[in-house]
Every structure is written in C-alpha cells, then in structure tokens.
Image (cartoon, rainbow, N blue to C red):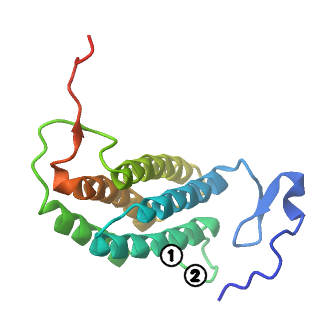
Amino acid sequence: MVVLNRIYTRTGDDGTTALGSGERRPKYDLRVAAYGTVDETNAVLGVARLHLKDARELDAMLGLIQNDLFDLGADLAVPQREGKAERLRVVSSQVERLEHDIDSLNANLAPLTSFVLPGGTPAAAYLHLARTVCRRAERIMVELAAKPDEPVSDAAIQYVNRLSDFLFVASRSVNDNGTGDVLWVPGQNR
C-alpha cells in the first residue's frame, strides 16, 4: 500500500530524485526519463478518456492500461538486482491482455488503404498523442536497457511496444471503426 502524507519533501531541491530502491539519481537520468515518460503517457490517456462517448468497453480497457502504466513505472523505478527481493514487475499476462484487446478492436475496423493522420474525433487525436508519447517511452526504455547495469525486463519493453499498437487501433476504433480516419494523401500539397 502506498501512503502519501506529505507531497513535498524538499529532497529533490538539489536536482536529484529517489528511485524506488532509495538510490538517488539526477532528475535527467535515463531511468527517471523512462518512468516519467510512462507517467506522461498515462496523463494523456486520462485526457483521451474524457472524450470517449458510448465507448464503455474501450474506456474499461484504458482504465486497466492506466493501472498497468503505474505498474510499469514502479517496475522501472526499481532496477532489478541479483540477490535483491523482487519488486512489482510487469508480467507477460499483461502483454497478452493487450494483444487480445488489440485483436478484439481490430476485428471491427475498416481495412487501411493509407497511413492515418492523427485526427478525426477528439478522442482519436488524444489516443494518437498518447501513442506518440508511448513510442518515446519505448525508445528511452530500449536505450536504458542497452546500458550496462541498467536492466529493463523483456516484459516491460514488450508491454510498451504493444501499448503503442493498441493506441493506434483504439484511435481508429473511436473514429467510427476507421471510416472516420483522416488518411494521408502522399504529395497532396505539391
């Protein structure tokens, strides 16, 4: 259980922050950037959910995802170390649930004939924004994982990769199952 009695601690006034392990890192540290960008993805999803109309199933999926993103942030905030007690980690069943939800939403979509431009409904536009922030989180996580002594689990990277795919399909879903998508027309403005 998390208890937050004091919101400010003044411990970050020196430009550092504490990981979940208690270790202090600079606020520009790649690990901090990774879980901060995951948090940013979650915030954009909160805005997208405000614009969903009559999409209860999708809203429920996004609610689960928002909770998963806190799990992912907790996972990233405590680097795996051998011999240390295991903390909260993203697991393969969370990735599998995303894959199931992608397949479920995708089954009803109009076939794509071009790349999709972010837009259509407000909900779709925010889901596209969440997708791009999620892709940035993925790039940071992969860069972090490539560093020596900076472990990132395979399941965490798979989750964020699948999430960006989910958000693309979800954006099309709220655009009248893809019929309201704004399609790219190559060279249209030459």
Q: Nearer the viewer, mark 1 or mark 2?
A: 1
Q: Percent x, y for residue 167?
A: 34, 56
Residue position for label 2? 86
Rendered-image quadrant of the C terminus: top left
Rendered-image quadrant of the N terminus: bottom right
Q: Residue furthest top?
A: 190
Q: Position of 61 compared to 23: left or right?
A: left
In the image, what residue occupies the spot 78% across and 60% down? 17
Q: Nearer the viewer, residue 123 or 132?
A: 123
Mark 1 vs 2: CB contact within 8 A: yes
In the figure, 55 relative to 132: above or below?
below
Residue position for label 1? 89
Within 10 Å of the Cα at label 2, are there few (<14), some (14-19), or many (20+) other Cα atoms? few
Please name the amino acid that badge 1 sits on. Answer: Arg
Q: Percent x, y for residue 71?
A: 52, 74
In the image, what residue occupies the spot 32% across and 50% down? 121
> Rounded to the nearest whole Å, what is the CA distance between mark 1 and mark 2?
8 Å
In the figure, 31 relative to 56: above or below?
above
Within 10 Å of the Cα at label 1, are there few (<14), some (14-19), or many (20+) other Cα atoms? some
